[in-house]
Image: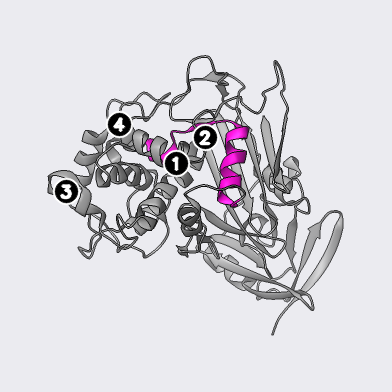
Amino acid sequence: MAAMQVRDGAATYSSASARGKLPDDQTLFELGSITKTFTALLLADAVTRGLTRLDAPVEAVLPDGLKLRDSQDRPLRWIDLATHRSGLPRMPSNIDDGIDGQDPYAHYGWPQMAAFLKEWKAVKPRDLASSYSNLGFGLLGQALGFLQKTDYPTLLTTRVLKPLGLVDQIFLTAPPGRRFLDGHNKAGQRVSHWNFRPAMAGAGALVGSTRGLARYAQAALGQFDHPLKDAFQLCLREHAEGEGVGARTGLAWQLGVLSGRPAFHHGGETYGFIADLWLDPTKGSAAALLSNAPVTIADLALHLVEPKAPVLDMALTRQAVVTLTPEQLAPLEGVYLLSPTMKIRMMAQGNRLFSQATGQQAFELFPKSPREFFAKVTPLEIIFDPGTGPAPALTVRQGGRDTRASREP
């Protein structure tokens, strides 16, 4: 595991290892979906240079007259791809044709993607709701190549990696001679690296180091001069509702809240690797954690950028979860007064319950029983008063302390 922190304009690095040589700030890890923020930056760069508009139709640049329409026969736009609101599925249905289960993207090129898109029929309007799509970001990278008459790898190198000074730290393919860690599965066994053809590269192909992510974060925070400042500003702006209650999204980046301050976040996961990156523009700070094993790191990365954020009690996250019906959750919905300045809103979405405190981001609660819940993103439990009707109050159990909150009338 390797970590980076940016504070006061300077980057620091640390690492840990269960066995073997410690990774350093130039050791390479698979970055997974953090790649999507680079792909979104390429889109923002094209927009700020006047090559296209966020609301322009993507099909205008696709070859062979390929159409890309929603259920109302309206063209999908660049912004729909970049905010996961296109209605495209998470993965194309033909991804399994000839697949290697250990390297799922290695075979999937533009011919396969084009064949899928030619037959795809949208089932909902564009911009109706957020639905995470690796296919959408793969297509975004491919279409940006078509727009600029090149391919995604060339575009990424010339428009992002070189201008930001990242060509020796962030790669689509790990160069020979660089230390590139093996990933591991949950059993601790080594697994194969993933490989991407350009068609899906924009969704998750990048490998990189903590030094590379530190410089990338400093570029996003405007801490050195470079030609992509306007493009970063376009990315790090609220553009749409995200997936989940109260979630908001920029171009790829997920918007969050750190002690009342706006923040930006993206994670990544491949088979054997986990990555997490946070930006805090208000304080000019950032943090990232990279792991070559499927362990929970989001809380650690968040703690690095915001020390007030607690680290998870892993035993808490492994508690058994029961399934509740929407009818069981309905009496729990409402606003509860924790203090004169702090309220907690409980919101049901189907058979899931979300909690959002004043000035904070919403997160999901997981039921241990019809009236007892716990969080996985932060170490707390919520216990609603017993009964079958609307809960008159709840108890927040965190850090060894119980705090009561009464329902607002």
Q: CA distance from mark 2 to mark 4?
A: 27 Å
| Label whose residue precedes the other's in the sequence (2 or 1) | 1
- What SS does tag 4 mark? loop
Q: Residues within 10 Å of mark 1 (few under 14, many from 20)?
A: many
Position of 153 with respect to 161 (left or right) is left
Q: Quadrant of the C terminus?
A: bottom right
Residue toward you, 371 or 10: 10
Q: Which residues are drawn in magenta?
A: 201-222
Identify the mark at residue 66; answer none if there is no mark: 3
Q: Mark 4 and mark 3 in contact? Answer it, CB < 8 Å.
A: no
* Disc nearest the viewer among 2 and 4: 2
The answer to whether one can see residue 76 in this image is yes
x and y percent of residue 349 in the render? 52, 64
Instruction: Find numbered disc 3 in the image and state the secondary structure of the residue it sits on.
Output: loop
Q: Badge 4 local density, few (<14 within 10 Å), some, or many (20+)?
A: many
Q: Nearer the viewer, mark 3 or mark 1?
A: 1
Q: Residue 166, labelled with which disc? A: 2
Label 4 sits on residue = 108
Residue at 75% x, 51% y: name it.
379
Name the main secondary structure of what is drawn in magenta.
helix
Q: 387 or 127, which lies in front?
A: 127
Front label number (4 vs 1): 1
